[in-house]
Every structure is written in C-alpha cells, then in structure tokens.
Amino acid sequence: MRQQIAAANWKMNCTLQQAEELLNKLATVSDFNSVNRIVIVAVPAPYLLLAKQKLAHQTNMFVAAQNCFTKKSGAYTGEISAEMLQSMDINYVLIGHSERREYFNENNTMLAEKVNLALEYEVTPIFCCGESLSIREAGNQNEFVAQQLKDSLFQLSAAQIVKVVIAYEPIWAIGTGKTASSAQAQEMHQHIRKALEIQYGSNIADAVSVLYGGSVKGNNAVEIFSQPDVDGGLVGGASLVAEEFVAIMNALK
Ligand code: 13P
C-alpha cells in the first residue's frame, strides 16, 4: 500500500523563534493516526537540526530540506549537498519546486542530477512537477508533466523510482488560493501513474506516492485527498499555521 503523506513546505518563512513555536506545536500532536501515514516538514536549511530535535519523538514525522545541489561537494558557496543532508540524518529533500525552476533557472537536466545524488546519499527526493497557467490553457499539461518526469526521473531504475515521492503542483494553484478541482487533480495524478506504469510496470506505479500541491487548506484537503490517485499533499501557506496543518494531516486517507 502506498504511503499517505502530509508534507509541509515552509519555503522562506519563519524566524528562528517562529520556527520553534511551530515545531513545538507539531511536537505535541498526539492524536495523529499513523497507520500508513506520515508527515514531512520541509523547513529552511538553518532550522534542519532544530526540526530534527523537536520532532525526534514523533516516529511518523520526518524533516526535509527544500533543496540540494547538483554536485557532491566543492567550491559552490551557499549550496547544500545531499551528503550533508545524509550526515545530518535528514531523510527527504524537495527537488524541482516550481519556485526553484522559475527563480533559480533549474531545468530538467539539473534536476535529474539532483535526484540521482539524493538517492546516492539515501535522501528521498520529493520531486515536484506541474504546469503553468498558459500550458494548462493550451491543453498541453499532460505532455508537459510527462516530459518533466521523463527528463528528470526516468533515468532511474525500478529499485530507485520506488524510493521517490512525486508532488504534482500546478503553478497556477500555488499561493493563489485557487486549487485544482479534485477531478483535475485526479486526472493528472492518474496520468502520472500511467506514465510510471508504462516505464516501470504496474506494481512499481502502484507503489509510488503522488502528492498534490497548490492551495491545499484544512477545508479542502479531505475532498482532494479522497481521490484514488492522490496520496496526500505538499502544503505551503497553510503549513505555517499549526492548526491548519494538523487538519490537513488528519485529512489523509
Ligand atoms: P501553497 O499551499 O501556499 O499554495 O503552496 C504550495 C506549494 O508550493 C507547496 O510546495
């Protein structure tokens, strides 16, 4: 059975004090039914170890980095390597978020390198894909997302791809308050799973968690997560409010 995942992406938000406060609240969540469900919190890099510490006793809560670099180590000022994450026992890393693609010019080829390195150092990539509004309006979203998967993930072996989490985040739904309808989400998630099936077979396709991201809130999560191919969410704004995020955690199947 695929894991159901509520993943928070704090992006570039929170002072240290605010981060502590939010983590303290997550650390005290006690009624989360964890059978086949996990929580992942992608915090800004300076707070990775703090988050690890605060959530240490929550056996089903994990910490993620928001990015790692395409090279193993060396003279790349400001960057974070997959090996560093492994050495800190950080289990997940977001790769290819649309904001990284847009503001930092990350392309599919670079993202393939990041995915490969993360797996080499046993950090699970949460690979983000998704189309812009103009691509959706032109009706080309399926081809566009399939190409993102092909270019950045399909170099992986079957044994590797089952270690990847995919997050479908339509850019037009990120931070806009406008979610994809549950039918639109299901349609794309089914398309992603079909692409996995064609490449790797149905057993593998069935084993990969595919999350939806884009204006997920406490009050729409149940509806979105109820879709058969939606295995949870990657949540931005609403993950900064503990009560909202806990409601989203509890909306997992
Ligand atoms: P919002 O939930 O704020 O729309 O952000 C989604 C996102 O980009 C998560 O990675």
Image (cartoon, helix red, strand yellow):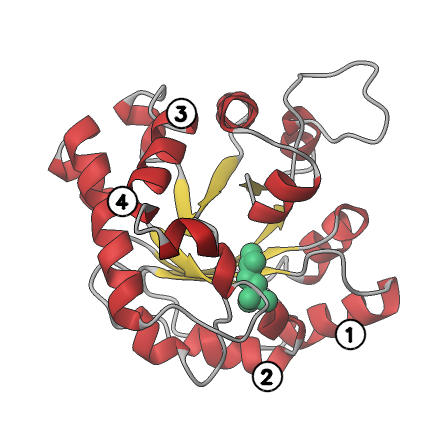
Residue 162 placement (x, y as % from top left): 31, 35
Q: Amino acid at mark 3?
A: Asp
Q: Amino acid at mark 4?
A: Ile
* Separation of residues labelled 1 and 2 (CA atoms): 12 Å
Residue 84 placement (x, y as % from top left): 71, 29
User: Is residue 183 visible from the viewing direction of this image?
Assistant: yes
**Mark 4 neighbour density, 10 Å: few (under 14) some (14–19) many (20 or more):** many
Nearer to us: label 4 or label 1: 4
Q: In the rendered image, which quarter contains the C terminus?
A: bottom left
Q: Residue furthest top?
A: 74
Name the residue at 33% across, 50% down: 209
Tell me whether circle 1 and circle 2 mark residues in contact (CB < 8 Å).
no
Nearest to N terminus: mark 2 or mark 4: 4
Name the residue at 20% across, 63% down: 228
Q: Which residue is mark 2?
A: 243
Nearest to N terminus: mark 1 or mark 3: 1
Tell me whether circle 2 and circle 3 mark residues in contact (CB < 8 Å).
no
Residue 100 placement (x, y as % from top left): 64, 42
Q: Which residue is mark 3?
A: 151
Which numbered dot is residue 33? Answer: none
Nearest to N terminus: mark 4 or mark 1: 1
Q: Amino acid at mark 1?
A: Glu
> In the image, is 198 to the left or to the right of 242?
left
* Separation of residues labelled 4 and 1 (CA atoms): 37 Å
Q: Amino acid at mark 2?
A: Glu
Looking at the image, which is closer to me, 2 or 214? 214
**Mark 2 neighbour density, 10 Å: few (under 14) some (14–19) many (20 or more):** some
- Which of the 4 quarters of the picture holds residue 166? top left
Q: Which residue is mark 4?
A: 192
SS for dot 1: helix
Q: Which residue is mark 1?
A: 21
* Separation of residues labelled 2 and 4 (CA atoms): 31 Å
